[in-house]
Amino acid sequence: MLWVIGVTVLATGLTLVLLQNFKSAEKVMERKVEHRYAVSDPEFRREMSVLLGPAIVRGNQVTALQNGNEIFPAMLQAIRSAQTSITFETFIYWSGEIGEEFSQALSERARAGVPVSVIIDWVGSTRMEQSLLDSMQAAGVKLHRYRPLRWYNLGRMNNRTHRKLLVVDGRIGFTGGVGIADQWTGDGSDPEHWRDTHYRVEGPVVAEFQAAFNDNWIKTTGQVLNGPSYFPRLQKEGDMDAHVFVASPSGGSESMHLMYLLAIAAAETTIDLAASYFVPDRLLIKALIAARGRDVRVRILLPGPHTDSLTSKADWGELLHAGAEIHLYQPTMLHTKLLVIDAEFVSVGSTNFDMRSIRLNDEASLNVYSSDFATRMTAVFEADLLAAESYSLARWESRPLREKLSEKILLPIKSQL
């Protein structure tokens, strides 16, 4: 009898610990944000910069890179050119050809005397062979796995770093959706090679990339990376205004949520959203429906038949009833994270449009305030729409009963794991 009690107590305790994984330490928004101004209004920038922070900085150049054929050569070229420092943080790093190529490039620079600091998520690197880790560390790369599983951190094992940040010499930054795995190589034209976008950035905002990396480097090592090797004086490189939002369960997650709510509430003509994982909460759904009430065109691009995660369609009906368009990308897994509003405002980075991403992960998003850049990203979005299939209200209403039951019971839990 005692052993039954003991097992019950142990199981109850473990359950309570695991439930801590789904708890946010911050206050949670309860009311929708009202439409008071447009994204082109100076008040929008003031609130984004002052109410939420960090500051919007001028003089940046952001270049969009499409799929592995463009993304990986640009990242590797930057790494191989490093002279003073490399900082790199990623969720996915798996063994394979591209993983080996990054390992060799980082190792070569470390052997040449360049300080190389790398954070790889413990969960995201489970398919990474130990020999790859060992070879980088032997070359002098300071490599740490983020939050490896220990008995004392079970309550936070679901809190992962999902950030994708690369900073070279404190002057060139990269962020976006790609992980270091062979799925991201190629041109995104077949199911084995994913569709994604990454961004090369120069200008003063790169210092905010470095600060975002430092945030988790301090958590992981207790050390601060500072000085001109990491934070050089940065000159104007372009004409784009931008800033970097970071989120984690210990601070900033509600600001990321509020950032999305403010941006959607400010929309007056268009909202274009590409999301690899789409699990919005009630406030985000209400915000999109309210935008439709203002006659804002809402287009949502999601993965179609090729996806690595099942998503609940339970809330799609409300959006479709309100006149929002939902499109499912057909050729391969769509892993892009892109929000474009009124051809003025663009948000990109690692953050998915779901509450796991916003409240449980460590994330980083780059917001760009530039009509020229927004126009270019709208063109990218519309090119992807040509390879997508429209999802109708009639199709939503006729989905099978088993799918409806799964959406209500299983998928909401699975989406958070």
Image (cartoon, rainbow, N blue to C red):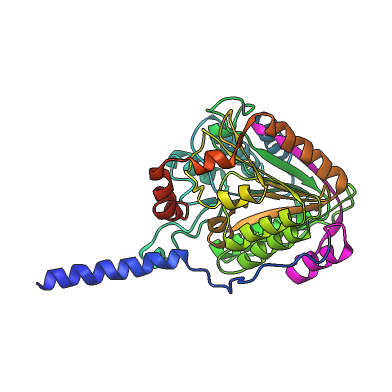
Q: Nearer the viewer, residue 40 or 143?
A: 40
Q: Position of residue 380 (x, y in %)?
A: 75, 36
Residue 216 in the image: x percent, y percent?
59, 61
For residue 374, what is the image quadrant? top right
- Vertical relation: 68 (above or below) 216: above
Residue 38: tell me if it is visible: yes
Viewer-side residue, 108 vs 182 = 182
Q: Nearer the viewer, residue 325 or 373?
A: 325
Judge left or right: residue 84 versus residue 415: right
Please state the total of marks drawn on the protein image.
0
Which residue is situated farthest in the top direction here?
Answer: 190
Which residue is at 62% across, 49% downward?
A: 321
Q: Which residues are magenta?
A: 38-67
Q: Quadrant of the C terminus?
A: bottom left
Instruction: Give yes or no for residue 242 being in the magenta stretch.
Output: no
Q: Is residue 47 left or right of residue 100?
A: right
373 versus 332 height, above or below: below
On whether residue 48 falls in the magenta region, the answer is yes
Question: Residue 377's quadrant in the figure?
Answer: top right
Residue 257 at x, y = what percent?
64, 63
Image quadrant where one finds the N terminus: bottom left
* In the depicted structure, whether residue 243 falls above or below residue 28: above
Residue 179 is at least partly visible in this image: no
The picture places residue 295, in percent across and down from the top left corner, at: 77, 52
